Amino acid sequence: QVQLVESGGGLVQAGGSLRLSCVASGRTFSILVMGWFRQAPGKEREFVAAITRAGGASYYADSVKARFTISRDNAKNTMYLQMNNLKPEDTAVYYCAADPTLAIMTIRVHTRYDYWGQGTQVTVSS
């Protein structure tokens, strides 16, 4: 089992920044492919970003590319999402996800992740 705890959400004005954190426990962190997803009210859960086990490769949704940066610190069992130039359309609950066996070709597919955090709310005002 893997436990994931997100933090760092909040209310920010458009153009501002936030950094989300996700701390993992229960399994060796370095074997986990990690991802961030988000879900706005009335919408489907959507892929935001993901990072491979050693952090050598990262993947982004087109809507956040060049604004968001995903990273991980395997020594601290922690993944981060630095969000800059936030827009009102970024408002959502952000979820951390993890999986030990995920194939890279499915890294954007939320149903492929076995473990999820409880989510953290990000609200961007215009």
Image: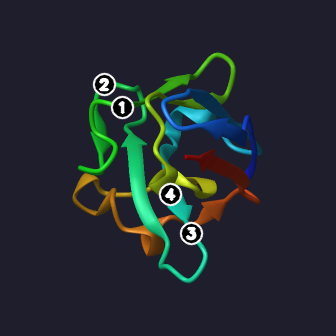
Q: Which mark is residue 90?
A: none
Q: Kindly identify the amino acid type of the residue bearing the numbered disc 4.
A: Phe
Give the percent coordinates (x, y) of residue 71.
Answer: 47, 26
Answer yes or no: do the residues labelled 1 and 3 have beta carbons within 8 Å?
Answer: no
The residues bearing labels 2 and 4 have C-alpha atoms spaced at a distance of 20 Å
Mark 2 or 3: the one toward you: 3
Among numbered discs 2 and 3, the one appearing first in the sequence: 3
Mark 2 or 1: the one toward you: 1
The residues bearing labels 2 and 3 have C-alpha atoms spaced at a distance of 29 Å
The residues bearing labels 4 and 1 have C-alpha atoms spaced at a distance of 15 Å
Quadrant in the rendering for residue 103: bottom left
Determine crowd level at label 3: few under 14, some 14-19, many 20+ residues with C-alpha closer than 10 A: some
Query: In the displayed image of the protein, which residue is found farthest to the front?
Result: 126
Q: Quadrant of the N terminus?
A: bottom right
Answer yes or no: do the residues labelled 4 and 3 have beta carbons within 8 Å?
Answer: no
The residues bearing labels 4 and 3 have C-alpha atoms spaced at a distance of 10 Å
Among numbered discs 1 and 3, the one appearing first in the sequence: 3
What element does badge 3 sit on?
A: loop
Q: Relative to 46, is 8 above or below?
A: above
Q: Which mark is residue 37?
A: 4
Which residue is rendered at x = 36% and y = 31% of the image? 67
- Residue, disc 1: 67
Depth check: 67 or 85 in front? 85
Q: Kindly identify the amino acid type of the residue bearing the numbered disc 1.
A: Arg
Give the percent coordinates (x, y) of residue 116.
Answer: 66, 60
Q: Relative to 65, is 66 above or below?
A: above
- Residue, disc 2: 56
- Colour logic: rainbow
Mark 2 or 4: the one toward you: 4
- Residue, disc 3: 40
Among numbered discs 2 and 4, the one appearing first in the sequence: 4
Q: Kindly identify the amino acid type of the residue bearing the numbered disc 3.
A: Ala
